[in-house]
Amino acid sequence: MWRFLIFISALGGTFVIGMTIVEPGPQYPPTKGAVWPKPQQQITEDTYFIYNPADFNIKVTGQSCLTLTDAITRYSFLARDLHRTARLLSRKIVSSTRKKREQLDDEKLIGNLTELEVDLTSACEEYPYFGMVESYNLTISAKPLLQSTTIWGILRGLETWIQMFYITDDFSEVRINATKIIDYPQYAHRGVLLDTSRHYISVANILKLIDAIAINKMNVLHWHIVDDQSFPYESRSFPDLSRLGAYNKLMIYEVKDINMIIDHAKHRGVRIIPEFDVPGHTRSWGVAFPNILTKCYNGDKVIGLGPMDPTKNTTYKLLHGLISEVQSLFPDRYFHVGGDEVDLDCWKSNPDIVEYMKQNNLTSAAQLHALFMRNVIPLLGNKSLPIVWQEVFDENVPLSPYTIIQVWKGYWQSEIIRILSAGHKVIFSSAWYLDHLKSGGDWVEFYSTNPRKMAAWYDSDIDVSNIVGGEACMWGEVVDDNNVMSRIWPRASAVAEKLWSSETPDHPDNMVYRRLEEHACRMNRYGIKAQPPSGPGFCLGAFS
Amino acid sequence: MWRFLIFISALGGTFVIGMTIVEPGPQYPPTKGAVWPKPQQQITEDTYFIYNPADFNIKVTGQSCLTLTDAITRYSFLARDLHRTARLLSRKIVSSTRKKREQLDDEKLIGNLTELEVDLTSACEEYPYFGMVESYNLTISAKPLLQSTTIWGILRGLETWIQMFYITDDFSEVRINATKIIDYPQYAHRGVLLDTSRHYISVANILKLIDAIAINKMNVLHWHIVDDQSFPYESRSFPDLSRLGAYNKLMIYEVKDINMIIDHAKHRGVRIIPEFDVPGHTRSWGVAFPNILTKCYNGDKVIGLGPMDPTKNTTYKLLHGLISEVQSLFPDRYFHVGGDEVDLDCWKSNPDIVEYMKQNNLTSAAQLHALFMRNVIPLLGNKSLPIVWQEVFDENVPLSPYTIIQVWKGYWQSEIIRILSAGHKVIFSSAWYLDHLKSGGDWVEFYSTNPRKMAAWYDSDIDVSNIVGGEACMWGEVVDDNNVMSRIWPRASAVAEKLWSSETPDHPDNMVYRRLEEHACRMNRYGIKAQPPSGPGFCLGAFS
């Protein structure tokens, strides 16, 4: 395994030897101070500065706010911690002879990095939002400067800054190379979907996930909070939903948890988009409110509960109340109302619903789904804009141009073309399902998908700029607190780079492998349990 | 996903509705107090005892020793901890009304469990070994009794005992049902292979892995300690092997680590079998000792280092010294000398080796591999018996009948028949590779493989009793400390049950799914980060 064949062409003909030359050490030696995702423009010199926390500070010269000072505290700590790690490793690993030898290499040394000037040129915004400006310029030179017009750009720039530090091979120093970066994202919406219904994920792990999202310069946590299996959202208006529908009283997100999550996220430039998926995937709602669900029949016999009952006023009343409450909690402008995988056969089996369809001249259950969504989306009022799964578009629900359609099924190129042609925005997920382990579940395959490029290739006339982003989806069947972080990271990092960076190779080259090796170890150092990306290797982060 | 179709046959014909009825809650409700792996004979009544630590003790009436008293301390703690967990959950989860309602169910109550008599009828043995007796009888009745002729049987019985406890739905009580168990393993050798070369695994995680091996009534940790990528074993005779060949100074197993691991394992009835894989998979040896490896040629040019050089005395001299040292550290009677995946093409490319083959009338490189193994195995002397990978058998190395062959390749049925026919013992691994995630990597597939049964089906005349066991193999390319435990467990539990229990279904039935759900949660409670086995569910263990 993990071996490579050597193909040899020799005198008099071509032949192949299946020789397996394996080198000792990591399969992909990690880079040193390479940024993930790759900045749009970066010029790095081989001259460098030495970082010493005793002789360094971050100076704010422009606007400031709590988000900025909080971020500076955080990143200052991380830089100090890297320095501490280097000293620790030096003491534990290196013999003194070796230390002396490597310190001679200093004709490239410019001097100490004594300062970083942070210049935010406009006032802070409180919450991150769709389309926010995240661009920044970062120069590491005699006068190091991070500049942006927005706090979000500053946050992204600080992340880049910390990633550029590296520890020398002999652990004697923390360095940063002279560099100029101009950076901005390619896509506006870059997220991870987390499903907390199939398994409950602890608040602590959600906070860690948000940290990791920010480290990867993503900006959305799409919180698929409830589903068929459990209803962990604690509603003040309908407390029975979670009292009866959650797995148990300990596996509930209370208002204080949600506020903490939103607060933690906004300080990192991460939006929290709630999803309450209707009318399908709602079985857990029915533990408290069985009447809002459809009875599915086999002949005369009720065999279970299916999707929400679209013919009943009580359904919409409850939804209206719940949506208002959720809107008051979640500040994001977008609200995901789901709409995927509705069990139309259950609707068709129910005599009352069949009767209703007749009376309302609905000739297919798909039309009933459309009717339901047409009733639900207005419940968002002016406060939220809808995101829906692609079925809602496929079933011809009239949608405002502000609606974003999330594409998740196969044959996605043609679907995207149809959606773009209809004037809607697209979030892409089809190729980025983190619960898939078999075909298509490897980060290399994630990395090899570029939705705009592939859609343009499919139809060169279409304007692909309305593909506004994508999400790596962590459905919860296969993960709980034990393995959720290692299942997401660094696999979702491949998606993060595809969505941020414009100039990525179609398939990862050797340098991408090496950069991801460093990046996964960096996440480990920050306490994020990213798994090994690509075969043999080691990360010293865990030891510091 | 995870949905099931309902097939309905109705009046006038057959038709199929693809209705997707999903129930809320876990997909497989965990059992309560079901033992994993399944005991050979178990009669469980629905009458039960209540466990209260204040009113309970374990009484040793037979032989005793440190391994026994240590185990009793451990299992007493686990029982107390379960009781503490129940009280904690009761306080956090249950309303008082519900508590009262469920406590009325007591016509099945026999009384308090005040004692467990532990009767070990022979003196303790110090180290577990191949073929040790692990059978035990356990009765939970008015006079609860655990009896075995060996300390190993007592250890297995205590594990069964603790697994039989369960917390009531209202968390008010810890109960154990009246039960009679007669139990013994089907296979003698039941192990997990851990590769610590591709990624270093911390000593703490190895100790946890040993705990998990014992919880699953397995009895072997096959420690694939070194390989091409790194040499983490610290040798006193050849300190340069790890000084230069390990990833770094922190990623080394010192003598004190190894002693701790062996000591921890023996107290749990787990053997530690060291593997030093030769002559292939040895690239890391060559960082310190390049001369013992073969130079691979492309024409006149050396292109890298390949397997050990079988023509040099220095190779055998180093091996002799190292093997003696390892033998003095590891008390197990078996020593795994590897022998898999030798790069014969490298040997064939080397002019000196080609010359040597000529002079020694070796007509193929496979014969050279045979010669090498024939030289190495005697280095074990009388102290160890060899285990080898199947290639060593395939290449007709003369092997003593005590040699165990580990089968790992495909087409294993015919291979096993050949090995058994030659009078050797077999350890089976082909279907149980934990690093495989794609086809064949699911626990359900692991569970559906029964080596003796399948070999007998292939050749009904063969005596399959020499298939002495199997191992689930955790090769290290894809795991490090971040994900190794969740990757192994509960997937290796499927292997554990197949190897222990005689009467398992050919494919897991609903009850197996439910029992594994409880078992994975039990491991979580013990601090072993087993991942969710089979879809939606929850485990309260992590909260206690």
Image (tube, coloured by chain):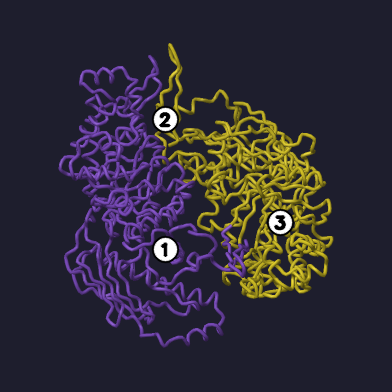
Chain colours: A purple, B yellow
Label 1 crowd bin: few (<14), some (14–19), many (20+), radius 10 Å: some
Residue assigned mark 2: B23
Query: Residue at the location (54% across, 56% down)?
Result: B479
Where B314 sits versus B372, above or below?
A: below
Location of mark 3 (residue):
B273
Q: Secondary structure at mark 1?
A: loop
Marks 1 & 3 on one chain: no
Disc 2 is placed on an element classified as: loop
A175 above or below A533? below
Q: Percent x, y for residue B60?
A: 72, 44
x and y percentages locating residue A244 in the rendered image = 36, 33
Who comes first in sequence, dot 2 or dot 3? Answer: 2
Res A526 label: 1
Q: Residues within 10 Å of mark 2 (few under 14, many from 20)?
A: some
Label 1 and label 3: CA atoms lie apart by: 35 Å
| Mark 3 belongs to chain | B
On the same chain: label 2 and label 1?
no
Q: Is A223 on the left-hand or right-hand side of B521?
A: left
**Side (left or right) of A71 relative to B307:** left
**Residue found at the far front of this picture:** A12
Q: Looking at this view, is B414 or B287 the one in front? A: B414
Residue A320: give x, y in percent of width and height: 21, 35
Q: Report how far apart the C-alphas of labels 2 and 3 lie in the structure.
A: 46 Å
B140 relative position to B528: left or right: right
The kind of residue on which mark 1 rests is Tyr
B275 to the left or right of A475: right
Residue at the image position 79 percent from the left and 73 percent from the top:
B313
Label 1 is found on which chain of the structure?
A: A
Mark-to-mark CA distance, 2 and 1: 39 Å
- Point out the image quarter for the N terminus of chain B: top left
Does any portion of residue A260 appear in the rendered image?
no
